[in-house]
Image: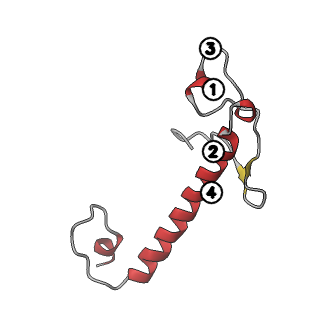
Amino acid sequence: MKNGQRLFSVWERSRRAVSQRGPCLCTVGFGRRPVVLKSCADHASAAAELALELNEMMIAEERFWKSAMGSPCCGTIDGCPLAKAL
């Protein structure tokens, strides 16, 4: 997502971008004659991998905060979920 708009979707099982006909996410994709994601080097696979890893990171962070619930907040993280739980 970028500014609330979906840039592309990813199939989790095959670990690839669903539609590779949209403009590439690099500067070439937004030029005067945009290059599609499919035709721009290894950017389709890199974009899919990035999206999947960001999703895994979000899941791991949610698991962490869930396991830490009930622990005291140290006050060093702005917007800490532990501070809100108090």
The residue depicted at 31 percent of the width and 71 percent of the height is 84
Sequence-earlier tag: 4 or 3: 3
For the residue carrying disc 2, how many other residues have a C-alpha within 10 Å: few (<14), some (14-19), or many (20+)?
A: many
- Image coordinates for residue 4, horizontal then vertical, percent: 54, 41
Q: Which residue is mark 2?
A: 47
For the residue carrying disc 3, how many other residues have a C-alpha within 10 Å: few (<14), some (14-19), or many (20+)?
A: few
25 vs 38, left or right, is: left
Amino acid type of the residue that numbered disc 4 sits on in the rendered structure: Leu
Q: Which residue is mark 4?
A: 52
The label on residue 29 is 1
Instruction: Answer above or below: position of 9 versus 36.
Output: below
Sequence-earlier tag: 4 or 2: 2
Question: SS class of the residue under badge 3?
Answer: loop
76 vs 68, left or right, is: left
Q: Which residue is mark 3?
A: 32
Gap between marks 2 and 1 measured at Cα:
13 Å
Gap between marks 3 and 1 measured at Cα:
9 Å
Question: SS class of the residue under badge 1?
Answer: helix
The residue depicted at 44 percent of the width and 82 percent of the height is 67
Q: Are discs 2 and 1 less than 8 Å apart at CB?
A: no
For the residue carrying disc 4, how many other residues have a C-alpha within 10 Å: few (<14), some (14-19), or many (20+)?
A: some
Q: Quadrant of residue 22?
A: top right
Q: Are discs 3 and 2 less than 8 Å apart at CB?
A: no
Gap between marks 4 and 3 measured at Cα:
29 Å
Q: Quadrant of residue 39?
A: top right
Q: Quadrant of residue 33?
A: top right
Question: SS class of the residue under badge 2?
Answer: helix
Amino acid type of the residue that numbered disc 2 sits on in the rendered structure: Ala
Amino acid type of the residue that numbered disc 1 sits on in the rendered structure: Gly
Sequence-earlier tag: 4 or 1: 1
